[in-house]
Amino acid sequence: MKILFTIDSLGNGGTERSLADLIRCFSPDTKVVFCYCYSNETLKPLYESLPVQLVGLQLKGRYNFVKGIRLLVQLIRKEQPDLIVCSLYRASIMSRLASWITGVPLVDTLVEETYGTQRRSVFKGIQVLKFLFPYWLDRFTAGRPVAWISNSHSIARANSNHLRIPFHKITTIYRGRDASQFHPWQAPVSDNRFVFAAIGRLYPKKGFSDLVTGFALVAADFPQALFVIYGGGPYEAALAAMIREQQLEDRITLAGNTPDAWKQLYLAHCFVFPSWYEGFSGALVEAMMMGIPIVASDIPMNLEAVTDGKTALVHRVKDASHLADRMREVVADYPRVVKMGAAARREALERFELKKIAQEYEGFLRSVVNKRN
């Protein structure tokens, strides 16, 4: 079986890393051509270490769809793959049209609720056009894929409604992680400090503004509480300003981009994940794999991974006051939430172990190819 994977770029995102993990576990008789369309090559060394034929289209600008489709068609005709698998918006649009031109079947992927209420609320006035045009282009071409892979049931249901995709065409396969990398977390020995930690790219949708507002309430009650945020992004300056306004510069640290940031969680007492909307989060799975206590927002994707009061404490999304209450609960009743973290680890090892997920993913692709032959 020969698969052509297409993706926007080799940027340092969850989808890019998860695909690399999956491909590393594929069987030797699955041949992979991996095509990235745009010039961000942050993860190129990672992909060069994989058993793949790596192709970069080096498209310039934000879209450049016409040239991208032409180059993809040339690549498809040269490589003659049995199946195309595309990920992320721009690669998906180009791959759908290239699939239509060449006749090679296509599997598309769903990694977040792109058109939900939370995301739509970000666009105001004339900016709504930046939402509507991509939406209608997405919806118009969504009939081309012969099948879809979603990384959560809730994302599958939402996009089925938004894009009018027949629900029976969508298969849910969760993100996996290599369990051998995650030794059991233990509460760090500290000099009377209590460290909360968060990981994520610094965008408004990640809920970090709620985190700062909520932690300001917690910090007033617990002088030993600190917060470290690992990640960089365009929201960093605004977040730093919020921290200064709350006079929390000595209590909240913006650690910036940190390679393998999940390893830093072994130095923390609790992982906080306040995202407003999300795909099925690899960062949340990593925290579960470790067994660190977790506080997470109640968005549907998170609730497919954790259960409130059993494997995590869950707060109402966009509710900084409730988030503060849950963080207070962590500090005040720590032995109980430590037990929840251990339960989360057991569940993650059962549900999200990488080799099991990769076998399911590869098996699904093989079934699609066999049905087309």
Image (tube, rainbow, N blue to C red):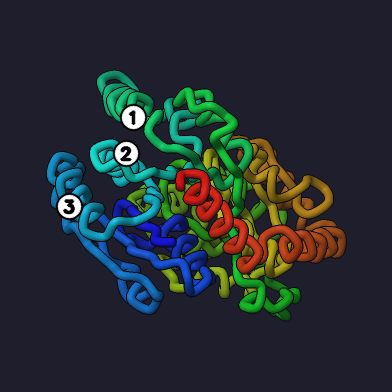
* Local secondary structure at mark 2: helix
- Seen from the viewer's position, the closer of residues 188 and 85 is 85
Q: Quadrant of the N terminus?
A: bottom left
Asked whether disc 1 touches disc 2, contact meaning CB atoms under 8 Å apart, the reply is: yes
Callout 3: 10 Å neighbours few (<14), some, many (20+)?
few
Q: How far across and down, in percent of the image, does residue 24 sit?
A: 48, 72
User: Quick check: can you spot residue 109?
Assistant: yes
Relative horizontal placement of residue 325, taking residue 139 as reference (left or right): right
Read off the residue under disc 1.
141
Residue at the (53%, 39%) spot, across then down = 277
| Front position in the image: 320 or 248 | 320
Badge 2 density bin: few <14, some 14–19, many ≥20, Cα 10 Å: many
Q: What mark, if any, has residue 74 been given in the picture?
A: 3
Q: Position of residue 336 (x, y in %)?
A: 86, 59
SS at circle 1: helix
Q: CA distance from mark 1 to mark 2?
A: 7 Å
Q: Nearer the viewer, residue 291 or 52?
A: 52
Amino acid at the residue labelled 2: Arg
In primary-sequence order, the first of circles 1 and 3 is 3
Q: Identify the residue under disc 2.
A: 96
Kindly indicate the quadrant of the structure image that contains residue 321: top right
Kind of residue sitting beneath label 1: Thr
Report the Cα–Cα distance between label 2 and label 3.
14 Å
